[in-house]
Image (cartoon, rainbow, N blue to C red):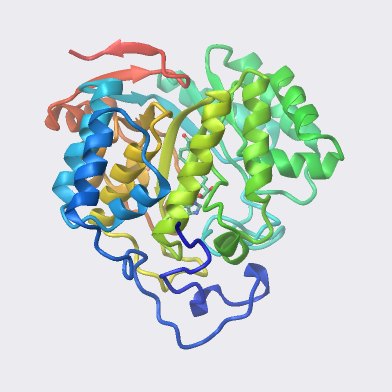
């Protein structure tokens, strides 16, 4: 059995001390990369895992932990690519979208977040509904976007009606654009400020024009980590319940995992297996997006960021464990284009999109461009020997670039 109670990384880094993140610091435990401390798996274990993957048998939690310690990264990549090819062959998906962050004012003080501000603080902003619509319409006039990706802070005083109105007006102005809006944590927040159930909130948003949910807010489900890095936010159970409800109401949703901070391999595996269990129930997740922690301008700035090698491992193991979510997104904005291209050899088959105006990662130090032209994106996919496919939000292929 895997011991989820015994972390191998430092869970008590000074950057994480303080009331916002929960428990008091225990000094003297230096940060170490999460993989350290996991025993090397035997060859027999790895041979058996490879057999299971090739026979399409499900991997266990123990298999997942063994893969995080597997010494041969190239072998892991080949296995992940094998699993990915069964789903999407040589196709690599992308969409043409725009990000819209209506407000960065946020009641939660997540230790990893560089985007949030208090109300009235320097740099805090909140768009009016008219500004949001005008911003989206300006992009739509210049670029054939098919999606608006809308993720926001948990604003302490904006009424729920503001979000409904924004959706209604965006839908009226851009009826052909899919509205992928509000993480499960925001849905949880709307339920808190209105006293309504998650289901009522989702129904009202769907009536106003909501098409799908982005995958943010999942972070790491394990309570040990959640308490420290995002103690104020909805629990893992709430996050999962909201996606379960969304799926029941007919929405497709995405799921994420924030990696490369204080989480252990066991906690990554636990996270992915909780997603796998929900997907067995509902089938409503369409893509999994491992999000690499960015370490500038936040309370976890002392932690080194995951290396490209660590990212490759996270992607490959995720592809192999999460055998029922079809797509795996390498979000180039966060990873850099070069790493994102490399991850196509470690199970990824989606690069997100042309993304206009990303804020959350750039405020955390991402040095990638704020947007990427279509030709650049096609170039990246083709240079990896793959076939670019433009998709819509729910993975209908819109154009295959031969
Ligand atoms: O939940 C915040 C992450 C998420 C940092 O569904 C950070 O297609 C790294 O929901 N370093 C929100 N990550 C973004 C989100 C998303 C992004 C891309 C694609 C999709 C999708 C959804 O951003 C948060 C958190 O996990 N995040 N700060 C940071 N410093």
Q: Residue at x 52, y 30 (%)?
A: 279
Give the farthest residue toward the bottom: 28
On the rendered structure, is 249 left or right of 32? right
State the image quarter where residue 165 is shown.
top right
Residue 175, position as x, y percentages in the image: 58, 12
Please say if 349 is above or below 297: above
Q: Position of residue 64 (x, y in %)?
A: 36, 49
Q: Nearer the viewer, residue 348 or 322?
A: 322
Numbered circles on residues, count:
0
Residue 253 visible somewhere in the drawing: no
The quadrant of the picture occupied by the N terminus is: bottom left
Please state the horizontal and vertical placement of residue 296, each as a whole percent of the image: 42, 64
Q: For this view, does 177 lie left or right of residue 36?
A: right
Q: What residue is at 56 percent from the left and 56 percent from the top?
A: 222
Answer whether residue 205 is visible to the viewer in this image.
yes
Against 67, is 8 above or below?
Answer: below
């Amino acid at each position: 059995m895997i011991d989820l109670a015994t972390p191998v990384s430092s869970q008590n880094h000074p950057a994480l001390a303080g009331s916002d993140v929960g428990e008091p610091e225990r000094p003297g435990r230096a940060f170490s990369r999460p993989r350290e401390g996991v025993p090397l798996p035997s060859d027999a274990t790895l041979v058996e895992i490879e057999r299971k993957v090739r026979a399409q048998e499900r991997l266990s939690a123990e298999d997942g932990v063994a893969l995080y310690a597997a010494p041969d990264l190239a072998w892991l990549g080949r296995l992940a690519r094998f699993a990915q090819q069964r789903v999407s062959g040589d196709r690599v998906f992308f969409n043409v979208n725009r990000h819209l962050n209506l407000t960065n004012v946020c009641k939660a003080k997540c230790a990893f977040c560089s985007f949030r501000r208090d109300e009235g603080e320097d740099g805090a902003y909140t768009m009016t509904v008219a500004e949001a619509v005008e911003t989206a319409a300006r992009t739509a006039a210049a670029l054939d976007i098919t999606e608006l990706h809308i993720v926001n802070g948990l604003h302490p005083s904006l009424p729920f009606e503001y979000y409904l109105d924004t959706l209604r007006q965006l839908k009226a102005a851009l009826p052909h654009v899919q509205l992928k809006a509000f993480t499960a944590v925001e849905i949880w927040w709307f339920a808190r400020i209105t006293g309504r159930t998650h289901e009522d909130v989702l129904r009202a948003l769907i009536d106003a024009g909501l098409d799908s949910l982005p995958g943010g807010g999942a972070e790491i489900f394990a309570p040990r980590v959640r308490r420290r890095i995002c103690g104020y936010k909805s629990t893992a159970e709430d996050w999962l319940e909201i996606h379960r409800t969304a799926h029941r109401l007919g929405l497709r949703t995405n799921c994420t995992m924030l990696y490369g901070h204080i989480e252990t391999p066991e906690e990554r595996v636990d996270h992915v297996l909780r997603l796998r269990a929900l997907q067995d129930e509902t089938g409503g997740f369409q893509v999994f997006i491992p999000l690499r922690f960015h370490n500038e301008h936040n309370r976890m700035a002392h932690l080194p960021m995951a290396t490209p090698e660590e990212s490759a491992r996270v992607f490959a193991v995720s592809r192999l464990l999460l055998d029922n979510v079809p797509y795996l997104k390498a979000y180039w904005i966060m990873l850099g284009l070069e790493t994102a291209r490399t991850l196509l050899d470690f199970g990824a088959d989606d690069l997100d999109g042309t993304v206009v105006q990303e804020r959350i990662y750039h405020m955390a130090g991402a040095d990638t461009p704020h947007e990427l032209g279509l030709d650049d994106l096609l170039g990246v996919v083709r240079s990896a020997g793959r076939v670019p496919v433009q998709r819509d939000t729910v993975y209908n292929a819109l154009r295959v670039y031969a």
